[in-house]
Image (cartoon, helix red, strand yellow):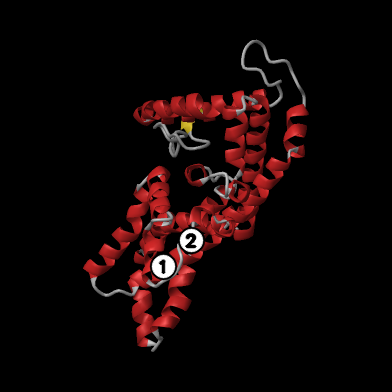
Amino acid sequence: MVSPDVGMPDCKDSGPGSYEKGGVVSMDTQTFRKMRRYKALYILFIPIVLYLLVFTYYPFVRGLVMSFQENRLIGKRPFAGLSNYAKVVADPDFIASIVNSLIIGVVDMVLYFVLALLLALMINEIRSSTMRKSIQTIAYIPYLFSWAVIGGVWALIFDIKGLVNAILGFFGQEAVFFLAETSLARPLIIGMGVWRSVGYFALLFSVAIVGIDPTLFEAAKIDGASRLTQIRKIIIPSLSGTMKTIIVLLSIGVLTHFDEIYVMVNPANRRFISTLLLYVYETGILNFRMGTASAGATLVMIGTVLIATVMRRLTRYDEE
């Protein structure tokens, strides 16, 4: 005779459908056990949650509420409905800011991606480890500086008495007031962003290249594949995941250029480089129209979410 208790687990099991003293362990019990087991991690996570609540989600909710209220600095702010949004959409400066943001943001996105990939591939071809690391460091250093420092350096370089005009004068050319030349306003802003950020994204690509399985290159060499073929058939396909991530990251910043614009804007180039966040700043902080500025900021957020969502779909970011 086989005892009826044979084969029945008498130990506690946290898996789905497991038995505990003849009963099934509920999902709530399993969750509670896991929380107790990893309680130290949950405790460490509390400051992060508090930070996000206080400095991210609360300001977001307050700004969203203010976008539906009248522009008042003192006293109660009566409900204004969609009037603030109507004012923003009808404002020619807001429309011009959208155009500037899209032009600067999209061109930046394309140049950052293409130049960073090319730079990473070029650095990877350098056989000297010391030289390779030195170039990576030099290219990455500008990203460590704030936009205020980068803008100051850029202004000095292109000042009427700056480095570029000194070189032009050496070759007998007349000095050019780059910072006041309207046709150069956007190229200067875009060039400044490329100078600062390409090294950072190139470093991301370089890290991904280092992680490629070396046996793939060995097999390609045995098959007689040239270096260009290896880049085209091995390196580029292996970087698809990193490419998707960088594209999504860059798409988030298409409409959110502010720091570099703020440090470089002047009356001569304002019409060509004033972006959405600069519009929000000037409307809310300088002109004290907080409701209108909050409406503009909300539209920027919606536009950013839409662009990022579209890029995730186009790149199939969520697929394996």
Tell me the number on the disc at residue 176.
2
**Which residue does the numbered mark 1 point to in the structure image?**
168
In front: 270, or 104? 270
Question: Is residue 19 toward the left or the right of residue 215 in the image?
Answer: right
In front: 93, or 132? 93
In front: 263, or 89? 263
Q: Is residue 245 visible?
A: no
Q: Residue furthest left?
A: 130
Which residue is at 47% across, 54% downward? 193
Question: Is residue 130 toward the left or the right of residue 22 in the image?
Answer: left
Question: Which amino acid type is marked by label 2?
Answer: Val
Question: Is residue 172 toward the left or the right of residue 250 in the image?
Answer: left
Relative image position of residue 9 (x, y in whole percent): 43, 35
Tell me the number on the disc at residue 35.
none
Which residue is at 51% across, 62% downward? 111
Question: Is residue 300 toward the left or the right of residue 174 in the image?
Answer: right
Which residue is at 54% across, 48% downward? 253
The disc, 2 or 1, on the residue closer to the chain's N-terminal end is 1
Q: Are marks 2 and 1 in contact (CB under 8 Å)?
A: yes
Name the quadrant containing residue 121: bottom left
Q: Marks 2 and 1, how far apart in space? A: 9 Å
CA neighbours of label 2 inside 10 A, class few (<14), some (14 to 19), many (20+): some
Relative image position of residue 202 (x, y in whole percent): 40, 61
Q: Is residue 239 above or below residue 18?
A: below
In front: 213, or 48? 48
Relative image position of residue 204 (x, y in whole percent): 40, 58
Question: Which amino acid type is marked by label 1?
Answer: Leu
Say which element carries label 2. loop
Quadrant containing the C terminus in the rendered view: bottom right
